[in-house]
Image: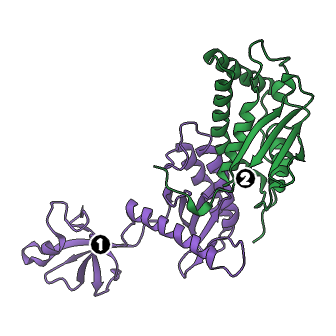
């Protein structure tokens, strides 16, 4: 999938819509015997790999499941602490699944507000008067495109760096927003968008954009 | 980054008469519900405001107009692009006040009042098309411009032309936007 996610941020910086459409992330499940040769640490309510990268399990990956049962933050499905469980030789051999942790809703909200502030700072840093805010953020693995309307709503799309045509996609998303979200009489402005039609049409538009724009391998 | 060419908006054709009749039914019902003309005018304005806040995004998404830098530019765009897009008419723009804050739109043709001859007796201060004023006010507020929009002259009340007056008030500061409670 060349387009990873879409975020819509309202005037006050609150996230009102997000859509993740990336392919299943790399996950690795392995059976271990005591002692565990990976160094685990607790960070932000998750158990992450701090050191000991091997076999597809990379530093930064989180413990996703133990013995097939999904973990709940730093606790196992049964309510025991993961680090304690994995420190006890009696529980071995154990099968643990590692993978890149998904962002929780709260984290997304926080990141959206932060981006909103950075966007405002971006336009103030400009040496020219009347500059726009951040339009594109580029890294080696993705590009973040942002389009702010004259009314202050921001549409943010994270895509593969090789994906082209994101500009017109952003304007298309604006049209879809003005049609299916705003014209819904029961949708209140600035509130989270919970309109089925909006989501359906957005997914369609993403598909069209991916087929039309990408010049890289795979989609 | 070049702007894409303005797309031709897709109009799903519906009968204009249906729209005019719907608007007429709306005003007639409001007249039944409220005794005083001021109340009807206020409610029409409020409804228009709700429509305007939503319509402005549709307008901006479809018309590809850029940021305006003066009040006269804004009024021109409202008259020549917005009215044309939604009502099919192009009012003319005049500037009333030399300090450039008061403008007027003169409508020579108004599809909404096509079938209305005159206001009923006892409803002499009813602004039949006050919805339009609310729409303009709501739309301007969403792009951070406070304005007072009223009917200055109305053919239905016996004046020679229909004139909508737009008075731009102090610009709302974008940075001071507060979270809605």
Q: Are marks 2 and 1 on the same chain?
A: no
Q: Which residue is more in the foreground, B54 or A65?
A: B54
**Badge 2, how many Cα within 10 Å: few under 14, some, many 20+?**
some
Farthest residue to the top: give it: B121
Say which colour chain A has.
purple
* Residue with the mark numbered 1: A44
Residue at image point 88% right, 22% down: B158
Q: In the figure, residue A132 lies in which quadrant? A: bottom right
**Chain letter of disc 2?**
B
Q: Is residue A199 visible?
A: yes
- Does residue A47 appear to the left or right of B26 in the view shown? left
* Above-or-below relation of B87 to B74: above
Q: Is residue A2 visible?
A: no
On the image, the x and y values in percent for residue A207 come to 61, 58
Q: Are marks 2 and 1 in contact (CB under 8 Å)?
A: no
Letter of the green chain: B
* Residue with the mark numbered 2: B60
Residue at image point 71% right, 39% down: B135
Whole-angstrom CA distance, mark 2 to mark 1, is 42 Å
**Chain letter of disc 1?**
A
Residue at image point 82% right, 50% down: B75
Name the element at disc 2. Answer: helix
* Above-or-below relation of B59 to A105: above
Q: In the figure, residue A53 lies in which quadrant? A: bottom left
Q: How many marks?
A: 2
Color style of the picture? by chain
Q: Which residue is more in the foreground, A52 or B153?
A: B153
């Amino acid at each position: 999938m060349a387009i990873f996610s879409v975020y819509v941020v309202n005037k006050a910086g609150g996230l009102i819509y997000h859509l993740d459409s990336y392919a299943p992330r790399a996950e690795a499940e392995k059976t271990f015997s005591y002692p565990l040769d990976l160094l685990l640490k607790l960070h932000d309510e998750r158990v992450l790999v701090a050191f000991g990268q091997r076999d597809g399990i990379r530093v930064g990956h989180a413990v996703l499941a133990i013995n097939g049962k999904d973990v709940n933050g730093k606790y196992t499905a049964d309510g025991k602490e993961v680090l304690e469980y994995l420190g006890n030789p009696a529980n071995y051999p154990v099968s643990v699944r590692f993978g890149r942790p998904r962002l929780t809703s709260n984290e997304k909200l926080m990141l959206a507000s932060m981006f909103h502030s950075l966007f405002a700072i971006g336009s103030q840093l400009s040496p020219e008067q009347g500059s726009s805010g951040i339009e594109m953020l580029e890294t080696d693995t993705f590009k973040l495109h942002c389009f702010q309307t004259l009314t202050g709503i921001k549409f943010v799309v994270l895509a593969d760096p090789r994906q082209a045509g994101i500009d017109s996609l952003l304007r298309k998303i604006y049209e879809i927003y003005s049609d299916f979200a705003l014209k819904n009489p029961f949708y209140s402005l600035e509130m989270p968008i919970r309109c089925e039609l909006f989501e359906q049409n957005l997914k369609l538009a993403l598909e069209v954009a991916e087929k039309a724009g990408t010049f890289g391998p795979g989609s | 980054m070049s702007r894409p060419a303005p797309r031709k908006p897709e109009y799903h054709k519906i009968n204009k008469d249906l729209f005019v009749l719907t608007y007429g039914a709306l005003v007639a019902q409001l007249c039944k519900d409220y005794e005083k003309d001021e109340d009807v005018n206020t409610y029409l304005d409020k409804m228009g405001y709700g429509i305007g806040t939503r319509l402005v995004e549709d307008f901006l998404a479809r018309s590809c107009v850029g940021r305006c830098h003066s009040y006269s530019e804004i009024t021109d765009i409202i008259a020549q692009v917005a009215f044309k897009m939604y009502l099919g008419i192009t009012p003319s723009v005049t500037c009333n006040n030399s300090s450039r804050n008061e403008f007027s739109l003169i409508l020579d043709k108004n599809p909404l009042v096509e079938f209305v001859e005159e206001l009923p007796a006892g409803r002499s201060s009813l602004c039949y098309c006050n919805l339009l004023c609310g729409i303009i006010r709501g739309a301007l507020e969403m792009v951070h411009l406070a304005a007072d929009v009223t009917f200055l002259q109305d053919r239905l009340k016996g004046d020679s032309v229909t004139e909508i007056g737009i008075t731009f008030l102090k610009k709302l500061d974008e940075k001071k936007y507060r979270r809605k409670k």
